[in-house]
Image (cartoon, rainbow, N blue to C red):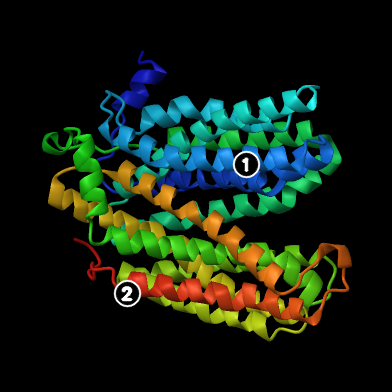
Amino acid sequence: MTSLSERVRDRRLDAAPTRAQTIAFGASGFPTQLMAQTFSAFVVYFYVSHLAVPAGWVAVAMIAHGILNAVLNPVVGTVSDRLRTPWGRRIPWIGLGIVPLVVAFALVWMPPELPVSGLIIWFLVVVAVYDVAFVVVVLNISALFPEIFRTTEERARGNVPRQIFAILGMVLGTAGAPALYSALGWPGMALVLGAVCLVLLVWSFFGGMIERRVPEAASEAMRWGDQLKYTFRNRAFVPYVLGSLFVQTSIAVILAAVPFYVRYSLRAPEGEGSLLLGVIFVTAIPSIVLWSAVVRRTSPRTALLWSVAVFGAAMLGYLVAADVPGAVLVGVAVGVGVGGLLQLLEVVLAQIIDEDAARTGHRREGAYFGVNGFVVRGSVVLQAIVAAVVLTASGFDAALGDAQPESVDGGIRLMLAVIPLGFTALAWFCFWLYPIRSRDL
């Protein structure tokens, strides 16, 4: 009787994945996005408001978290590409990382009774473990996508369930977490969400994460120096990763601006912000199916250019919306563009990896996803700069409450519509320079 380790070792994918394998692989999008969204949305609030840790110390800890996360991406990606085991390159990372990831995520919300200095140390240590495990698991799952799904047709179809699961995880992470911690407390929320994430990751791991047999010539590990040289000299990857950075910055600025827009421009209750954000993600779900059909009939580059254009044009509606219903309609249009971006960015990156493999003889999914993850982390920095500059220049003063000067409304609308449009235009130009025009190599 074969052991579990042997069964995992002997699994190899030799043809197109089945529908069951596609859905199981896609299920990984739910727990990873659930953890990411819950962490980013509530960790500062939890430690500052509920545990009374000084905001300055939490800010320092979050900066350290961001730096560690950014640096880990290219390092883990490159090491993963070089790994050779009987179980494959990606599977050992994912299998060994799932439990530490879920446990570290839960422990973030379950600190023991400690003085402030102890809570800071707890935060730094637990979040460092969470960061390492998150990058190890998520990057290697992403690196499996171009390997499991080999053509534009397969990738367009295979990415649909993954992105739908991811959006549902985002929604639960931002909207469901508050309901859970209100009813069960923070430890209860951590245990419930952790259990859900563990179950889905285990199902995805055994049901959908299968590596292919790597040809002998492509199985040799590329030297470290050549890894960097071929990645940054890739004529397709450089415009892609810059365009991805600008797109992610646009989305980050919109998400940061919506709460200000609801309160100070639309003069609506703060809770309406959930409606404005929710309609974007809800609309994105059927839009993913739409853009899947578009890319199968055109090419990854053409479909991506169209989705960026739709996204950019739609957000201009926030300039003129006068009330919440009007802003919701704008959000529907924005969601159509967001659905395209979620569906197409990884399809295009997979195409870049195929072209690189044809040129170098090496499959280097980890390196490309790692460097991409490192670069797009810059969107957080750009978003913070935009918010600080716009709010300061418009005369925003939190002490004034709702009695802000009229210039604040204009500044917020600028931050929500015009500035993201500028970043989106830069993204469109970068993707226009993308040199691969065909569907498949």
Residue at the farthest left position: 217
Q: Where is residue 233 in the image (x, y as percent from the top left)?
A: 22, 55
Q: Is residue 354 left or right of residue 369?
A: left
Residue at 32%, 24% in the rendered image: 9
Binning the other alpha carbons within 10 Å of mark 1 as few (below 14), some (14 to 19) or many (20 upward) gives some
Q: Is mark 2 on a helix, strand or loop?
A: helix
Can you say whether 225 is above or below 388 in the image? above
Q: Position of residue 113 (x, y in %)?
A: 81, 22
User: Is tag 1's residue or tag 2's residue first in the polypeptide sequence?
Assistant: 1
Q: Name the residue under label 1.
A: 62
The quarter of the displayed image where residue 164 is located: bottom right
Residue at 35%, 23% in the rendered image: 7
Q: Position of residue 399 (x, y in %)?
A: 87, 63
Can you say whether 416 is above or below 164 in the image? below
Pick the front one: 304 or 256: 256
The quarter of the displayed image where residue 57 is located: top right
Residue at the farthest bottom position: 320
Report how far apart the C-alphas of labels 1 and 2 lie in the structure. Answer: 35 Å
Q: Is mark 1 on a helix, strand or loop?
A: helix
Q: In which quarter of the image is the N terminus?
A: top left
Q: Position of residue 141 (x, y in %)?
A: 42, 41
Can you say whether 3 is above or below 73 in the image? above
Residue at 34%, 19% in the rendered image: 6
Q: Which numbered disc, 1 or 2, marks the residue closer to the eye?
A: 1
Residue at 81%, 34% in the rendered image: 51
Q: Mark 2 points at which residue?
A: 432
Q: Which mark is residue 299?
A: none
Residue type beneath disc 2: Trp
Q: Is residue 189 visible?
A: yes
